[in-house]
Amino acid sequence: MTQQAEPHAIPGEAADDAAPGESRAAVQRVTHGDGFGAAFCASMAALCAEVVIAVTVGLLVVLSREHDGIPKGPLVITAVTFGALLLTVLISGFVTAVAVMPALGLARRAARRRGREDGRLWAAGAVPVVSAAAVVAFGAVAALGSLHFARPLAYLVWWGALTLGLLPAALAGRAAARRVRDDRPGSVARRVTSVGAVAWLAIGAVGAGVYGSGLVKVYEPPRLTKADMAGTWTDGRGGTVKLASDGAATAEGLDNFTWDGTGKDKPKDCDGSGTWTPLKDGGSVQGVSLRINSCELSRDWSVIGTEKAPRIYHEIGKPGSGKRYVLTKVVKQKK
């Protein structure tokens, strides 16, 4: 009678205790368990590949649109890239632990209750369920923090995006676990990494060709002079500021965002006169420093837009919030 090794037996001891007629492959099949480690690694590899490819596509799109600039210098680029990759690995591990592995476990349990094998369809069907649970949990936490719920469409969009993101990772993890249980050679994680690297290189080559050929141009802030900045700028809601060529400024109904003591910036109308000076970088105007003494407005504005339709803005609230107060230059139409 063949002696069976314990589920957590040491590989070397298991091989020694095996019966003469039992192959080493059979012993390894017992000691490998359910392939949890292989599934975890394959899921992380798939998620990392998805993030890297998505970020690359996003960067290629952002380069052609208005942006605040990209890091310059080899050291800065290296540091940002290394930090981003490290963050991607950490996030991928977290998502695998809290979403992908529970989805695979749910698929196995559901299949066993029906007396069937946990095939790809079971894993694919478990992902939307886990995604819905994650959206409900994190949506509830966000609602408690902001004291209001988001629009129902927002939750639906998040559920769909999370489902699409988790599906490849779940399928890769399921394939890796099955490969270990069936004692088949090869690593799904390595295969996913190789395919992801090839896809990333292909996308990068296409992007380089598109930008290098001039078919799509990289966005650059407009190159303006002090004379170009002179004129009337409006926020489109009745707030304006007139910048005179001699450096004088006159504000009428301009929003002045002040700290309200609760962690938010609330706008107050600013009326009065003051001064402005151009902020230059490399000979061209990159912004405006505006001072209105009557309402204690003191802001540095950055230039965006195009030379034909320039705009100036400053951030609202905490740095990196993404909220901006934007003014557009009023261009007189020629008769």
Image (cartoon, helix red, strand yellow):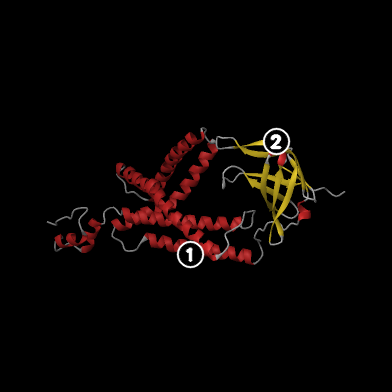
Quadrant in the picture for residue 208: bottom right
* Placement of the N terminus among the 4 image quadrants: bottom left
Quadrant in the picture for residue 263: top right
Residue indicated by mark 1: 198
Name the front one of labels 2 and 1.
2
**Which residue: 18% across, 59% down?**
14
Mark number displayed over residue 217: none
Q: Position of residue 189 (x, y in %)?
A: 38, 59
Q: Are marks 2 and 1 in contact (CB under 8 Å)?
A: no
Name the foreground residue: 26 vs 313.
313
Name the foreground residue: 135 vs 148.
148
Tell me if residue 70 comes above or below residue 107 in the rendering. below
Mark number displayed over residue 269: 2
Name the foreground residue: 229 vs 217.
229
User: Quick check: can you spot residue 71?
Assistant: yes
Q: Position of residue 149 (x, y in %)?
A: 52, 34
In the drawing, does residue 248 fall left or right of residue 143? Answer: right
Quadrant in the picture for residue 129: top left
**Which residue: 41% across, 57% down?**
45
Q: Which type of secondary structure does the marked residue at label 1 adopt?
A: helix
